[in-house]
Image (tube, rainbow, N blue to C red):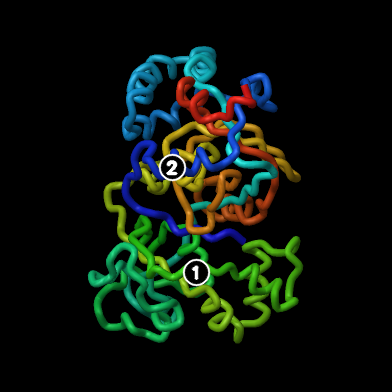
Amino acid sequence: MRSIGRFAGAVLGLGLAVMASQTQAEAKLLTFADLQGWEADDHQAALQSFLVTCDLLRGPDWKPICALAQEAVVSEAASKAFFELFFRPVQFGTPPALFTGYFEPELSGSKTRTSRYSWPVYRRPPELKDGMQWHDRATIERGILRGRGLEIAWLDDPVDLFFMQIQGSGRIRLQDGSVVRLGYAGRNGHAYRSLGDALVERGIMRSDQVSAEAIRAYIRRNPQMAGPLLNVNPSYVFFRKLNDLPPEAGPIGAMGRSISTLRSLAIDPDFVPLGAPVWLEKDGVDPMWRLMVAQDTGGAIKGAQRADIFFGTGQEAGRKAGNIRDGGRMLVLLPIDRAYAMAAPESF
């Protein structure tokens, strides 16, 4: 099971650290004819997702591209031609990639603590600063924040709360029918540890059996293990209310804008620039060939060939996302001059 901790706020452009990491990773320049399934994709839908964050990209090569994107989105043919004219696909690192999935949970909850709803969703404590290592999960669960008025809402299941923290966003449907949208507000600074890895290490599951549903089922069968197992992961995520986010909009990604179902990826920004188009070729039971946009990040998303696919909101999206752990490859679409500059000469 992958770990996601959303990094809030807009992360803009192609910084020096990103370019240095890309240079260190093996880079290979390809053509659009090399991309499996390219001709059949919905390029207009991909361009619409790209436009959501395009204005946040910085650099002399991005600005004119973003201006022209507004004109190209009018049709599928124009959208496809736009990508082929102004970009080249570059493969960083060596496949196989590792693709996992994430989603926005929708859970039942309460504004106040009751006998049923007794697990708090906390906002970020004011003393917790970015990059600071704070109390671990076990300490927080023992009640160190109790009585401080930091509760946004209350849930009825600690496992639901745990997995919402992994996703980094959520919707809570309250008893009066209203819905609270939640976004990532920060974390306690401890490295994430996978529950799936812990179960494999203990011989409880094989690696090919691990999924969100398998972990849930194990804890339901062994409720006495809920606390000790969840506390294996010392990382703890805090939330904020998103009062102005429309119901039809996706959750907020790392660039500070809503992400799109099956068009947005969480990537490692040390290798893939946030906001860039990314061509994905996912293997597995349900292969996926489509153009995505790198609009999010995650605590366990590390490496040039690593990405998390956003599957949408609700239970069905969660089921699909939880079953994804597939190989394949991913390629970054870069402006032409940048693509040739980044790729090794022998790959031309």
Q: CA distance from mark 2 to mark 1?
A: 31 Å
Q: From where the camera sits, is residue 260 visible?
A: no
Mark 1 is surrounded, within 10 Å at the Cα level, by few (under 14), some (14 to 19) or many (20 or more) other residues, namely some
Quarter of the image with the N terminus is bottom right
Q: Amino acid at mark 1?
A: Phe
At mark 2, the secondary structure is helix
* Residue 242 appears left or right of 51: left
Q: In percent of the image, x 58 and y 38: which residue is there? A: 92
Q: Which residue is mark 1?
A: 162
Mark 2 or 1 closer to N-term? Answer: 2
* Residue 196 appears left or right of 113: right
Q: Which residue is mark 2?
A: 18
* Residue 127: image location, x then y, percent: 24, 72
* Residue 262: image location, x then y, percent: 55, 39
Q: In percent of the image, x 41 and y 86: which residue is there? A: 142
- Quadrant for residue 332, please give it: top right
Q: In percent of the image, x 31 and y 82: which residue is there? A: 146
* Residue 2: image location, x then y, percent: 58, 59
* Residue 116 appears left or right of 326: left
Q: From where the camera sits, is residue 91 visible?
A: yes
| Nearer to us in this view, 183 or 137 | 137
